[in-house]
Image (cartoon, helix red, strand yellow):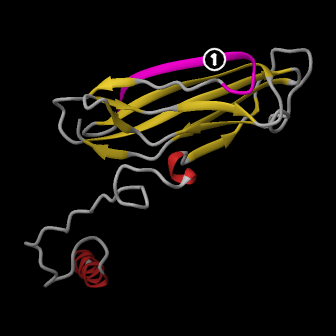
Amino acid sequence: MRMMITIGAIAAMLTAGVGGPALGSGLDSEPEPASVASPYPDGGDNPTDPALVYPSISSLRAEGNDHAVSATGISPAGCYGQTDIPHPSELIYASVHGRTYCELAPVLELGVTTTLQKLGWLYWEYALADKNMSQYSRTSNDAHPHWQCSGWGSQAYRGTSFHYSVEPSGTYTSNTTGLERRFSC
């Protein structure tokens, strides 16, 4: 009795499409490969839309405070972080840019650490990192790691950045991750 219930349950799942392919679904055929389109409107390497050049933007928020004043919420100076889309550079490098910017006022200190990652077989692998910081400024300037990628063939890359600003009301931080992009060097 138990075996007939199990066989009946398996047959019901296969018929419903749960637990495996339905009969006659072309088990010998390979799935169509997903096409990877350029993120740019012209289909090439030319960014024309600012939203595509800076796909990852995040406001800086309060963190554990090392100042006497407690920080809460979003940066009063309007600080935010950006991570761009990775791109080939000088024919032999993969590169990505990240920055921290304050719209409303200069701050005591602000900075960014940007990491370029390469997609491995199972997970994102560290390629290289760069950092930049400024004091009494509105911009950290770009942190832009350049990793020599020639000889690796076509690879998928992405950038991640850690942003911070130190203001009279406290320290504010954010993390951003840009879109991935596949290219050869």
What residue appears at the point 50 percent right and 34 percent down from the top-left corner?
160
Q: Position of residue 120 (x, y in %)?
A: 27, 36
Q: Position of residue 37 (x, y in %)?
A: 33, 59
Judging depth in this view, the residue of 67 and 111 nearest the camera is 111
Left or right: 172 as drawn, with respect to 155: right
**Label 1 secondary element:** strand
> What is the three-letter code of the residue carrying label 1?
Met
Q: Is residue 19 above or below residue 164?
A: below
Q: Where is residue 102 in the image (x, y as percent from the top left)?
A: 75, 32
What residue appears at the point 41 percent right and 30 percent down from the top-left corner?
116
Is residue 108 on the magenta stretch?
no
Residue denoted by label 1: 133
Q: Give the range drawn in magenta.
A: 124-139
Local crowd size for mark 1, using a 10 Å CA cut-off: few (<14), some (14–19), many (≥20): many
Q: Position of residue 163 (x, y in %)?
A: 63, 28
Query: Can the viewer see residue 67 in this picture?
Result: yes
Judging depth in this view, the residue of 79 and 121 nearest the camera is 79
Q: In this view, does 136 lie above or below 92?
A: above
Question: In the rendered image, which quarter is residue 157 located in?
Answer: top left
Q: Is residue 70 above or below residue 14?
A: above
Question: In the rendered image, which quarter is residue 24 located in?
Answer: bottom left
Q: Is the magenta stretch mostly helix, strand or loop?
A: strand
- Looking at the image, the residue that sits furthest to the left is 28
What residue appears at the point 49 percent right and 43 percent down from the top-left corner?
178
What residue appears at the point 26 percent right and 85 percent down from the top-left corner?
15
Left or right: 159 as drawn, with respect to 164: left
Q: In which quarter of the image is the C terminus?
A: top left
Judging depth in this view, the residue of 98 and 27 nearest the camera is 98
